[in-house]
Amino acid sequence: MFDFKVIAESETSRARAGILQTTHGLVETPVFMPVGTRGSVKSVSPEELLAADARIILGNTYHLYLRPGCDVISRFAGLHQFMHWDGPILTDSGGFQVFSLAKLAKVSEEGVIFQSHLDGSSHLLTPGKVIDIQNCLGADIIMCLDDCIQYPATREDSLAALEITTKWAQRCKQAWQETNNGRNALFGIVQGGMFKDLRERSAEELMKIDFPGYAVGGLSVGEPAEVMLDMADYTLPNLPETKPRYIMGVGTPENLIELVALGADMFDCVLPTRNARNGQMFTQYGTVNISNARYKDDTEPLEPGCECYSCRHYSRAYLRHLYMARELLAYRLNTIHNIHHFISFMKQIREAIVADEFESFRKNFYRKLEN
Ligand SMILES: [Zn+2]
């Protein structure tokens, strides 16, 4: 059920447009995937995601394993039915959350032992268990367990994490092959810290194991944007051209367009949803803070011309009022706009690649931001 085809390539950059086939439908790439960590894209319903033209969303293994747990979700035959989302789902393995949220994470070759951030209970995640959990969640694309390190990290620590990540990737692949019913695809995750040769080595080792797709992890962890782009620039050409390439956890619209130019196909980030809840709205002319007093009696929509539900029906003054009054509707309307913005931005990028007008699109994008 899983397939990826590149249908157009930019003449002037590594940007490409493709089609990803999954069990729950087709996804046109490059694609932005809204984050539904705990089985919900915060404050919006699946119908609202569809209206924003979201095609694939993320769930998180670490969070869903701890709460509500696989015993609950398996009663619904998986996350799709449980959360009433019939489109493709990608689940992150939880590696990143173990290292960022859990207490006392201890890594060994066997796996990672950690204490739940919810109740302090002790858990062991192994490569095999991570595949079992993701099979239970029923995601279309599942991820290997990886060893995420903090930034900055020494070369020694980055190398150790890379080596563990490769070993876990081998065991994940084996566990996946033993349990795979053809309904999901397993992606490997490139690590290697901020060291180019380690990134290259990680990519090579994963390619030997051979995955249906590849992700670049450990980016956007506190490093400057130039370093993030530099690492992606170096890593992406080392991954097979015929497979989808996913940059995890990035980023701003400026990051996204540059990463597309470097040959990335898939993205996820909490930025549009989290920032919506903080009143920061994304528009083609840059970000807008809806709490700003200048919008107090502004009768215009947030972004004139935007076709999202929020912009079609509400004014900046109303959105500001809701936000200032901490009305719950503020979170929903703001999130609807931001998700719509990120998704339509990626669709425009894709159209530009297909028309081989990516460079002029990119120039125009920056020109509008400067205004
Ligand atoms: Zn809008």
Image (spheres, rainbow, N blue to C red):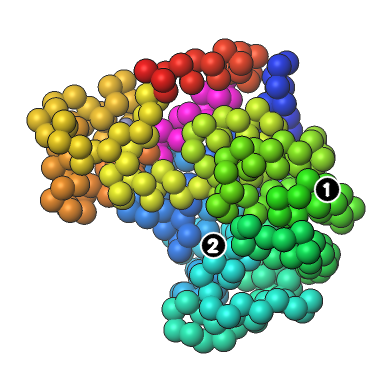
- The kind of secondary structure the magenta stretch mainly shows is helix
Left or right position of 40 against 135: left
Three-letter amino acid code of the residue under disc 1: Asp
Task: Give the magenta range.
Answer: 339-351
For marks 1 and 2, give the CA distance: 30 Å
Q: Is residue 347 left or right of residue 295?
A: right
Q: Can you name the residue that lies furthest to the left here?
A: 297
Q: Decide if residue 86 is in sight here.
A: no
Q: Residue furthest bottom?
A: 121
Q: Position of residue 306 (x, y in %)?
A: 33, 25
Q: Residue at x 37, y 55 (%)?
A: 42
Q: Is mark 1 within 8 Å of ligand 1?
A: no
Find out whether residue 5 is within the magenta segment.
Answer: no
What amino acid is labelled 2 in the image?
Asn
Q: Which mark is residue 14?
A: none
Query: Which of these two is toward me, 317 or 63?
Result: 317
Report which residue position mark 1 lands on. 197
Task: Tell which of 335 and 308 is nearer to you.
Answer: 335
Viewer can see residue 316? yes
Dot 2 corresponds to which residue?
Answer: 60
Residue 196 position in % (x across, y down): 78, 46
The crowd level at tag 2 (other Cα within 10 Å; few <14, some 14-19, many 20+) is many
Of the two numbered discs 1 and 2 in the rendering, the one whose residue sits closer to the viewer: 1
Q: Which percent across, then down, holds residue 224?
A: 57, 44
Q: Quadrant of ligand 1?
A: top left
Residue that protrudes farthest toward the right in the picture: 208
| Residue at the image position 31 percent from the left and 50 percent from the top | 277
Decide whether residue 342 is among the magenta residues. Answer: yes
- In the rendered structure, the answer to whether residue 230 lies left or right of residue 242 reads left
* Residue displayed at 30% across by 34% down: 288
Point 14% across, 27% down: residue: 298
Q: Is residue 98 above or below residue 335?
A: below
